Amino acid sequence: MRKTIIALLLLCLMAVCLTGCQKKADSAADKAGLADYLASVEVQSNALKSSLEKDALTQPEMNQKSGELRDLWDAAMNRMLEEAKKVLPAAEMEKLTAEQSTWLESRTQAAEAAGKEVEGGSMYPLVVNMEAAGLTEARVYELYERLK
């Protein structure tokens, strides 16, 4: 009976160790996956920026590409926030959620302020989108550093 109990305890201990090791492996894989994802976003972002700088585009085409760039970085930011939900303790996630809400408001204000100079003109979407994309890109890297 005593040997059976010891054997069961050893099995439980091994299971706990393996589960903990698996969580560490999953965490490392998640971080590697996040780095790969961010590298992919950078490639897409650089392609859009290059097109905006070098291609002969009409104003509507520039507005559209700048919107795609903004959307790309918004999606990356949302991905970082989803990852944060998986790894951060509830209290820290609650704090980050409040911080994110404040950040989103300030981004909107900064983007609108950047567009004031060309408000009403055909360049307005381009200027606002580029400002929002730049701010969001920086925010993505801030969030990524927190998750590392």
Image (cartoon, rainbow, N blue to C red):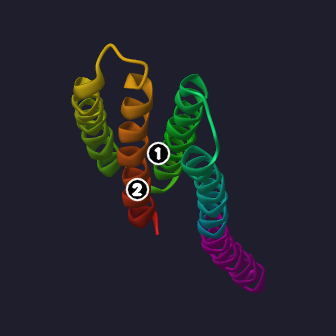
Q: Which range is magenta?
A: 1-30
Q: Residue at x 39, y 47 (%)?
A: 134
Circle 2: is it few (<14), some (14-19), or many (20+) Cα within 10 Å?
Answer: some
Magenta stretch prevailing secondary structure: helix
Residue 89 visible? The answer is no
Question: Picture quarter containing residue 40?
Answer: bottom right
| Towards the viewer: 141 or 119 | 119
Question: Picture quarter containing residue 103?
Answer: top left
Q: Identify the disc placed on residue 81.
A: 1
- Asked if residue 11 lies in the magenta stretch, the reply is yes
- Asked if residue 16 lies in the magenta stretch, the reply is yes
Q: Residue at x 61, y 47 (%)?
A: 48
> Mark 1 and 2 residues: CB-CB less than 8 Å, in contact?
yes
Label 2 element class: helix
Q: Which residue is mark 2?
A: 143
How many numbered marks have been drawn onto this rendered protein structure?
2
Label 1 element class: helix
Q: Report the side of 21 relative to 73 (left or right).
A: right
Q: Residue furthest front?
A: 56
Please determine whether, in this image, residue 107 is positioned above or below residue 14.
Answer: above
| Residue 30 position in % (x across, y down) | 63, 63
| Residue 71 position in % (x across, y down) | 54, 35
| Towards the viewer: 14 or 127 | 127
| Residue 2 position in % (x across, y down) | 71, 84
Q: Residue at x 29, y 36 (%)?
A: 107
Q: Report the side of 82 relative to 19 (left or right).
A: left
Q: Amino acid at mark 2?
A: Leu
Q: Amino acid at mark 1?
A: Leu
| Towards the viewer: 23 or 11 | 23
Answer with mark 1 or mark 2, whichever residue precedes in sequence. 1
Please determine whether, in this image, residue 81 is positioned above or below residue 33.
Answer: above
